Image (tube, rainbow, N blue to C red):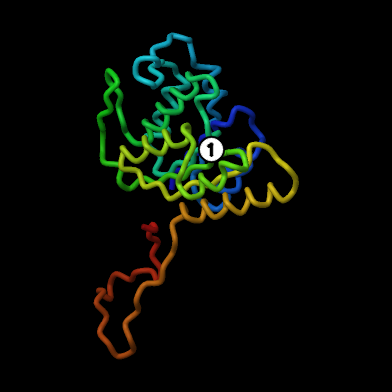
């Protein structure tokens, strides 16, 4: 299981970063790669303003190309971001949209999105949104702020299965807020993790449908639907 966690919070180490760490911890045995959006932005953005036409970054840079390949090959994505991305530098939003589109194998040409490469129906994603207390309950019922809603729509257009969105605060207000973020993030991580279900075993005296020469395990791993 190849997982990419994108931390798109402007300041690292806050509730979004903490929630991403807790969610990833639920994916035992996964190959996890972490991307810090604004670190990548500072290395790759050339202020070319090409993103004004398509809404996505079009910059070619070694670090960015490597991140795009990493996302295209991953089968699970976790994005942690602030709710209102438009309140920050719009070039950062364009870069995030390009990264999320690369995960879903979406290509942008002259502002139009076309799917490229292999089907991505097997891919899964989850979102973590930092929002003020008044926006938290709305985010939990699906009324998402503009920034994270745009990410969700991009994933939906690519055929990626979004298992849900966890809402955390914009800043710590005490131990209770950290505990709530931990619980929400772990629940989201468990929803992403492949679950092991028991396989039906024939009753005693009944012939087995499996060939005796090719034993199969008692348990098989299957992704949740």
Task: Using a 10 Å C-alpha cutoff, classify the residue at mark 1 as few (fewer than 14 neighbours), some (14 to 19) or many (20 or more).
Answer: many
Between 125 and 112, the residue placed more toward the observer is 112
Question: Residue placed at 27% from the left, 24% from the top?
Answer: 112
Question: Residue placed at 39% from the left, 30% from the top?
Answer: 69
Between 187 and 173, the residue placed more toward the observer is 173
Q: Residue furthest front?
A: 134
Between 114 and 75, the residue placed more toward the observer is 114
Q: How many marks?
A: 1
The picture places residue 174, in percent across and down from the top left corner, at 75, 45
Question: Residue placed at 30% from the left, 27% from the top?
Answer: 107
Question: In this rendering, is residue 102 above or below 165?
Answer: above
Question: In this rendering, is residue 80 above or below 86?
Answer: below
Q: Secondary structure at mark 1?
A: strand
The picture places residue 21, in percent across and down from the top left corner, at 60, 44
Between 169 and 15, the residue placed more toward the observer is 169
The picture places residue 71, in percent across and down from the top left corner, at 41, 34
Write down the quadrant of residue 217 in the picture: bottom left
Write down the quadrant of residue 171 in the picture: top right
The picture places residue 98, in percent across and down from the top left corner, at 40, 26
Location of the C terminus by quadrant is bottom left
Question: Residue placed at 61% from the left, 38% from the top?
Answer: 132
On the picture, is 194 further left or further right than 177?
left
Disc 1 target residue? 80
């Amino acid at each position: 299981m190849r997982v990419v966690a994108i931390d798109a919070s402007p300041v690292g180490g806050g509730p979004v970063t903490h929630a991403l760490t807790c969610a990833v911890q639920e994916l035992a045995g996964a190959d996890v790669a972490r991307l810090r959006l604004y670190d990548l932005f500072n290395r790759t953005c050339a202020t070319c303003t090409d993103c004004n036409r398509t809404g996505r970054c079009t910059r070619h840079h070694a670090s960015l190309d490597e991140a795009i390949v990493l996302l295209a090959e991953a089968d699970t994505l976790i994005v942690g971001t602030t709710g209102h991305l438009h309140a920050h530098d719009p070039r950062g939003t364009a870069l995030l949209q390009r990264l999320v589109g690369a995960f879903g194998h979406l290509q942008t040409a002259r502002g139009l999105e076309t799917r490229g490469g292999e089907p991505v129906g097997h891919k899964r994603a989850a979102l973590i949104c930092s929002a003020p207390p008044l926006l938290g309950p709305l985010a939990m019922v699906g009324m998402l702020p503009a920034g994270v809603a745009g990410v969700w729509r991009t994933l939906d257009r690519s055929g990626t299965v979004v298992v849900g969105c966890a809402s955390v605060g914009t800043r710590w207000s005490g131990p209770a807020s950290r505990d709530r973020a931990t619980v929400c993030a772990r629940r989201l991580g468990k929803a992403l993790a492949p679950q092991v279900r028991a396989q039906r075993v024939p009753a005693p005296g009944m012939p087995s449908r499996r060939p005796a020469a090719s034993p199969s395990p008692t348990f098989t791993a299957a992704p949740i639907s």
